[in-house]
Amino acid sequence: MNPLIDLSRDLALARPELLLVAFALAGAIIGAWFKDRSFTTLSTLGVVAILASGLLSVALNSGAAVEIFQGAMVVDGVAGFAKALIAISAAATLALGADYFTSTKEQRFEFPLLVALATLGMFVMVSAQDLISLYVGVELQSLAAYVLAAWRRDDARSSEAGLKYFVLSAISSGLLLFGSSFVYGFTGSIHFDAIAAAVGEGAGGIGLIFGLVLMLCALGFKMSAAPFHMWTPDVYEGAPTPITAFFAAAPKVAAVALMARLLYGPFVELTGQWQQVVAALAAISMVWGSVAALIQTNLKRLMAYSSIGNMGFALMALAAGTSKGPSSALIYLALYLPSTIGMFALILAMRRAGDSAETVSDLAGLARKRPWMATLFTMLLFSVAGIPPFAGFIGKLAVFTATIDGQVYWLAILGGVAAVVAAAYYLRLIASIWFAPPAEQLQSPSSTIMLTAVASAALSFPVLVLLLGALQSAAENAVRMSF
Amino acid sequence: MSEIVAGWPILSIVTFLPVAGAILILLSRMSARGENVGYDNGVKLLTLLVTIATFVASVFAFAAFDFNNPNYQLQESIPWAFGASYAMGVDTLAISLVMLTTFLTPICILASWVIEKQVSSYMVLFLILESLMIGVFCAQDIILFYIFFEGGLIPMFILIGVWGGDRRVYAAFKFFLYTLLGSLLMLVAIIYMIATAGTSNIPALTEYAQSTGFDQNVQIWLWLAFFASFAVKMPMWPVHTWLPDAHVEAPTAASVVLAAILLKMGGYGFLRFSLPMFPHASHYFQFFVFALSVIAIVWASLVAFRQVDMKKLIAYSSVAHMGFVTMGIFSGNEQGIQGAIFQMLSHGIISGALFLCVGVVYDRMHTREIAFYGGLVNRMPVYAAVFMLFTMGNVGLPGTSGFPGEILTMVGAFQISGWIAACAALGVIFSAAYALTLYRKVALGNIENPKLDKIADLDAREWVQFVPLIIATLVMGLAPTYVLDFTASSAQTIIAQFAGAGQ
């Protein structure tokens, strides 16, 4: 086979990633030349580039899994599905961030470039087909994220967030490499198919399990699953709000999709082994995410625990160990994203005299002051709380279905109880919005914010009713093609 | 009349007409230049018209319904995701409860005329609530049922929390979380059932449960999961504690809806799911439910006797009356189940009317304390007469609709166990004690409190509110066979399903 012909085919299939690379490099040059004046242009271009790469990923999906770059990456259903979700959420949070930094006069041109690079890292993660590209993807995403967390370099909290994220994340990267080396050592390959074959022949034993568990811990850290969640509340609180929104959305998809690929790809033969680990991660995340959120007064810390709990539910689907597991996790994420992004958009909108809302009591009396925003916020909150008829309920339904399909009944019941505890703190926000007397007058929200919020709320209910069937079959087809 | 609606999705129209009204109000709010009294009155009027239109639509549905056919009718079905479908359909049990809902909602809107703050939000939530309540009874798909069943919590939570009394936030949280915990366990059970039976269609699930049947050991767990949800909703002792709080703090109309309709969802659930789908477990737990019912009847009646708050007293009397319903349902014989259905409909009307009676004096004096009142008959003779009628209904006086339900459920229970029926009969005596004492303290005697000197009798709006309820109470009391003959077909189906597979 001619390696050059091979390469041109591979490059064609890697167009989404190449587009992001091109944008990041060209943007760096433009930024170096025009400095921060190019912020608005670059942000707009960034949104377009990220959305285009997402669209391309869906379009390139040929209906069968194709390996590229000598098996380093794969273009398949799960990758396409996850990339579309990542692109949409990254673009939405980039638009929100551009809007926010314009109003706070922090227009530094690196912002869209870093978001694009993080997105590129996530694309590589979800397409990874061997241990090296897995690690490279994770690190590319993480490095961009560290810088973003420390975005306000003069602000103590933001710098602290960046440093904390970096140090703790570096440890988890070490764990990931350490685990990968075990896997390589005991199976003799870094390529997922070869690992799967080796595992199928009974290679490994305790050493392989050890490596797998280390890798799971590291990925648990990246997706902020308890008990590896310690960094999450601090980083969420310290980072500027639109960057927190970014952390809460796209990287979660990438981490869950990567974990699904790892568990249901190379290690599918070891289901009995990893199932307990994933179930434990899921259980601890759900319970701790819900219980700890009850006492939070800071909105961003509360959102951090909310995302920990939600990752617990996504992991619960993965713990099923049947083919319904990964597809339900993807459906869950697809329905979780709009609620999260919409909520962050509305948190950004709660501005009075330049300060964005920080505490739950800042929401007080929103229903009196701005009934429309209150209605949207309420819909989104009920959605993440998993109350029907909103999207979050459908997501929970999918996850519970997968868990029961995998006969992990105790986890399903525990999930039900955790969901009630979680509902309690979402209700606290709703109570603040509706029941408390109004606080000070708010500034008018920008059109970007309102557009995002309206779109998210629409996706959480009316549009969803029509599109749910399509979403479900897309997720199931993606999983069927990939694993 | 049935030809008019032939080919129309009449159940969907009945269900979603209120939501359409809610959307109309939301749109009007967008174009309105700020909310003022004129706008608020317009919204109230529009809501009233929409709820009346819904009632008319439900009458059309009722007319299109074939009384002699025991199967589900007026069916609609559109496939959806996860194997679920948007399937609607009613039998005689379901359509009776739909009629109860559409009948009471306009009365609730009339009772809400006194609302002054955030009127448009209130009316929107109330209309959404009505849609969800009707949907619960019409749903033919268990997932759809669950969506309506749970979705109803949202508007109720906000209604209690915004327009309620002093401890409204506490009551709203308690109501929501209590019900949610029960419901999520039920959701897990529902998903298990769908996975096992391979369908989420309620008639098909019932068919599966009757022919193949769920494994008897699993049935016990499934039954308990459903019980967790319905017992809280009902509410049964000892998980009733959310009810007095929610009732007391809710605005009048929300109390009416809570007592008259939301509580019926528990009974409906037992009749629709627990008995036909888990007959073995229902037999197994029969005495467990009897025990809880009798405790509820006796204990709640005694607690009601000691209340100082009028609404709380009526709330506890609801717990007692729901005890009769659960007792009747789990007798599993014709008298028991027919009595339970009748009691549900009758309690919907009587307890709703009693809450409206409390609302009348609360709107005037802004207190529900029993000791505050006394001698109202001197200043409000018409009110006193109306209140008297519904008090007697609550006691179960023959001639009012309260009587047939109580006597039938006791007859039903007597066939299973004489002791259970005897204990329940004690509750009837107690209910006379607390209800008549309440009436004596509030209405009879001389006016001692000078603040009551100026209190006015019922006005025209309140008249309109009570007249349909008075008629319904008397008709159902004097001619119960109209209702009983109508619900007989559903009852017989359920009895056969309960008896057939259970032995």
Image (cartoon, rainbow, N blue to C red):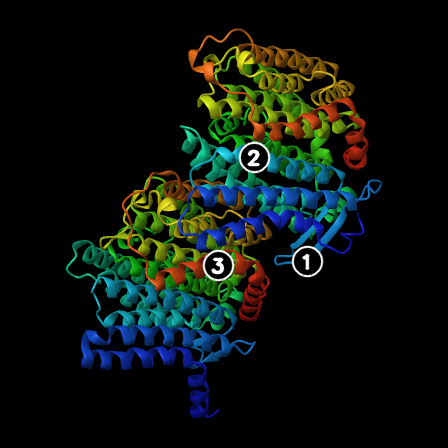
What's the amino acid at mark 3? Ala
Q: Quadrant of residue A112?
A: bottom left
Separation of residues labelled 2 and 1 (CA atoms): 36 Å
Numbered label attached to residue B78: 1
Residue count near mark 2 (Cα–Cα under 10 Å), binned few <14, some 14–19, many ≥20: some
For disc 1, the chain is B
Residue A226 visible here? yes
**Disc number placed over residue A458 in the picture, else none:** 3
Q: Are marks 3 and 2 in contact (CB under 8 Å)?
A: no
Task: Name the amino acid, label 1.
Answer: Ile
Instruction: Look at 28% across and 62% down and name the residue there.
Output: A100
As shown in the figure, which amino acid type bears the numbered disc 2? Answer: Leu
- Residue B218, image quadrant: top right
As measured in the structure, the alpha-carbon distance from the residue carrying label 3 to the one carrying label 2 is 33 Å
Q: Is residue A42 above or below residue A395?
A: below
Whether residue A435 is situated above or below residue B405 in the rendered picture: below
- Image spot of residue B3 (x, y percent): 81, 51
